[in-house]
Image (cartoon, coloured by chain):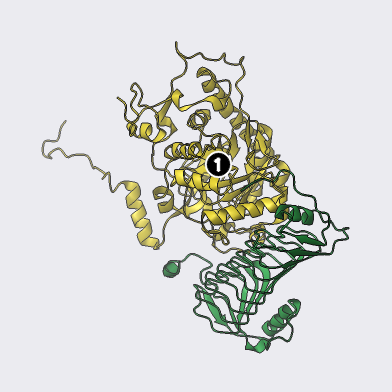
């Protein structure tokens, strides 16, 4: 029976501007007086590889036979100047993540997985651990502004050197590792007091600008007798100019990280509001390489939200030589696994949304220095899962490449792609599906 | 930048003239020195501001550079003694692990940056950011140091006979700073601390190790270090970040 004594009421309506998450952040900020710090990359929805599609083959394009005709996946990084370039079996690498932000077991698992898959893994803002070096057949040694643990012996032990100018989650920002994770071993490796909230520098201490960077790269080459490939990693912000300047400075490889790329700990406002999506960064970077006659001579590795072989194939089709994964690799190891849901709930979150990596309480035992938690990750089993995931990514990428008639994944090209949205079409420089219109480039 | 595929072999490592020999050949030869090497002394002539001169050494050898060096001279040095009879460019002895680097003239910016160990002695002045992010090195500057020296310095000692520029020791960790002259200003979280006998003994020890024992009165230094107030994020410190 309808109660006619009360007039009908509209449902409560949340503001699109002041949505529940925004309201909760205002309350949190008012209570604490300090900005929110978290791990991971941008969570907001931005134009991404999902907004692109492959056309595949048709009357005018011949596909390759799946599982029968060869579709190559190998890639050589660093042949421009290094006498010992790096050869990878698959064009997907493991991105830099520090011991300190991750447990030693997690670093070992990343090394094991990458090695099984025939690719490289990368150190981070905490130096090189023996476990990581021992279990990584190809290890890239990051050269960061903090220079924590930096030493010439590890430099010579590395297979490649990555000069980190910035990362996608925080172009222009330095690292951060809060006291809960500065264990005795982490503190010793970084020459810091135990338990302090550590801030890494955002600028390199001994070079400023591209002219200095060229001299710095030359020094690293001299120290390692011109053997090691030298990468330059930048956060995606001004990709055309950053790529051109990295090439001018003598880089063998440019690593370009979009805003969806993860971080161990950074201000949420930085992650969500600084930098651009990787989709918007690849074509300008490729254009810079092409303008300099360096495309395929200086390799381009892109990262930031790469989750599948489809993402990989799209990035390669846009002109990248390889992709790099960080967050996806951690998920493959077991990060945010629903089997720990009760513990995520106890931490005030839920599986899939957990991003308080800086607090060191990770139920999956990955982003922690707590030995009890870290023991939950079996490095051998974790490495196997990562290798499986890398294998699936590669098979997926090959599936798409064969459908497009390519005998090597590097033969994918922009012509194979269309976009589902005007924004993605403009950023990726490919036509809106069903049209020949590339926004900003004319056409009908 | 060019890649030298076939480095020039050196006829002798006793005296190397960089007017005639590529830098890369010199560095390669120096890198090849092992523990059993007979080479204990190398003279380098006509450096003409070359960058990365004697970088990456890992042997107990003395390299004397007669002239001015460019950027990153003796970068990442281990065990070796490198003496520059002249001035040095940016980042001399950057990330040094051990050994002794001596510049008889002035040093440019970021001298001893991030160095983990060894001794860096500069007889003249050092420019901005001397000892930035130092991680255990001992740096002695007989002249003055520029602004932002010992920025984020983590460990080791910086001794300055002259003056220090603005923002000395900004965001300092556990490095110890001793300055005889004036300090233009102290950086965030850097404070003057009382000088005790153990600190005077430390100054004496460091000066002696740098070959400067008795050069100055150790009681004429003043001591600066971290207030350790910024070691943890706290809302009350927001204005300092």
Foreground pick, A154 / B189: A154
Label 1 crowd bin: few (<14), some (14–19), many (20+), radius 10 Å: many
A66 to the left or right of A159: left
Give the residue number, with chain letter if any, for mark 1: A326
Q: Residue furthest front?
A: B20
B145 to the left or right of B21: left
Colour assignment, chain B: green
Q: Quarter-wise, where is residue A423 in the image?
A: top left
Q: Position of residue B227 (x, y in %)?
A: 54, 75
Q: Position of residue A277 (x, y in %)?
A: 43, 41
Q: Is residue A141 above or below residue A305?
A: below
Q: Residue at x 36, y 24 (%)?
A: A433
Q: Position of residue B169 (x, y in %)?
A: 55, 73
A116 to the left or right of A332: right
Q: Is residue A31 above or below residue B179?
A: above
Q: Quarter-wise, where is residue A382 in the image?
A: top right
Q: Residue at x 77, y 58 (%)?
A: B58
Residue B6 in sight here: yes
The chain carrying label 1 is A
Foreground pick, B104 / A207: B104
Chain for colour yellow: A
């Amino acid at each position: 029976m309808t109660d006619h004594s009360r007039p009908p009421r509209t449902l409560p309506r949340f503001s699109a501007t002041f949505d529940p998450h925004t309201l909760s952040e205002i309350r949190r900020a008012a209570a604490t007086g300090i900005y929110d710090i978290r791990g991971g990359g941008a969570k907001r929805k931005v134009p991404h590889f999902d907004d692109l599609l492959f056309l595949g083959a048709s009357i005018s394009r011949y596909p390759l036979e799946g599982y029968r005709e060869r579709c190559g996946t190998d890639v050589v990084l660093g042949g421009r100047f290094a006498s010992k370039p790096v050869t990878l079996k698959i064009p997907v690498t493991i991105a830099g993540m520090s011991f300190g932000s991750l447990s030693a077991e997690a670093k070992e698992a990343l090394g094991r997985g990458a090695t099984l898959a025939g690719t490289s893994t990368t150190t981070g803002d905490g130096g090189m651990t023996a476990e990581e070096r021992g279990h990584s057949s190809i290890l890239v040694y990051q050269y960061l502004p903090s220079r924590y643990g930096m030493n010439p012996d590890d430099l010579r032990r590395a297979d490649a050197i990555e000069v980190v100018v910035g990362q996608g989650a925080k172009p222009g920002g330095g690292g951060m590792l809060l006291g809960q994770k500065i264990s005795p071993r982490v503190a010793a490796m970084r020459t810091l007091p135990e338990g302090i909230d550590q801030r890494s520098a955002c600028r390199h201490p001994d070079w400023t600008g591209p002219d200095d960077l060229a001299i710095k790269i030359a020094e690293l080459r001299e120290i390692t007798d011109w053997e090691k490939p030298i990468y330059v990693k930048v956060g995606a912000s001004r990709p055309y100019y950053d790529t051109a300047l990295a090439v001018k400075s003598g880089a063998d490889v440019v690593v370009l990280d979009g805003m969806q790329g993860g971080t161990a700990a950074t201000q949420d406002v930085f992650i969500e509001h600084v930098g651009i999506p990787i989709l918007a960064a690849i074509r300008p970077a490729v254009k810079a390489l092409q303008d300099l006659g360096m495309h395929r001579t200086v390799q381009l590795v892109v990262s930031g939200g790469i989750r599948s072989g489809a993402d990989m194939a799209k990035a390669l089709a846009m002109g990248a030589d390889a992709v790099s994964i960080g967050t996806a690799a951690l998920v493959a190891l077991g990060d945010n696994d629903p089997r720990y849901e009760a513990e995520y709930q106890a931490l005030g979150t839920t599986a899939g949304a957990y991003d308080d990596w800086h607090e060191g309480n990770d139920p999956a035992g990955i982003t922690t220095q707590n030995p009890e938690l870290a023991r939950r990750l079996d490095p051998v089993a974790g490495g196997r899962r990562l290798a499986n995931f890398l294998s699936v990514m590669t098979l997926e990428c090959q599936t798409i490449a064969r459908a497009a008639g390519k005998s090597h994944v590097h033969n994918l090209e922009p012509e194979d792609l269309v976009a589902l949205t005007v924004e993605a079409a403009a950023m990726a420089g490919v036509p809106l599906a069903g049209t020949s219109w590339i926004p900003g480039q004319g056409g009908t | 930048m060019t890649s030298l595929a076939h480095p020039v072999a050196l006829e002798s490592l006793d005296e190397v003239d960089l007017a005639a020999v590529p830098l890369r050949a010199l560095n390669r030869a120096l890198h090849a020195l092992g523990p059993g090497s007979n080479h204990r002394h190398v003279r380098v002539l006509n450096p003409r501001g070359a960058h990365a001169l004697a970088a990456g050494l890992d042997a107990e050898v003395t390299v004397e550079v007669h002239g001015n060096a460019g950027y990153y001279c003796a970068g990442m040095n281990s065990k070796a003694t490198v003496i520059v009879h002249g001035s040095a460019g940016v980042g001399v002895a950057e990330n040094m692990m051990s050994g002794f680097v001596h510049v008889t003239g002035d040093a440019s910016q970021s001298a001893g940056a991030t160095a983990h160990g060894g001794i860096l002695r500069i007889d003249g002045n050092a420019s901005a950011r001397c000892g930035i992010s130092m991680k255990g090195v001992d740096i002695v500057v007989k002249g003055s140091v520029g602004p932002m020296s010992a920025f984020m310095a983590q460990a080791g000692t910086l001794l300055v006979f002259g003056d220090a520029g603005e923002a000395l020791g900004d965001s300092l960790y556990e490095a110890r700073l001793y300055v005889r002259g004036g300090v233009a200003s102290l950086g965030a979280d850097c404070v003057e601390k009382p000088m005790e006998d153990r600190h005077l003994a430390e100054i004496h020890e460091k000066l002696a190790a740098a070959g400067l024992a008795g050069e100055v009165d150790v009681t004429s230094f003043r001591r600066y270090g971290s207030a350790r107030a910024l070691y943890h994020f706290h809302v009350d410190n927001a204005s300092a970040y």
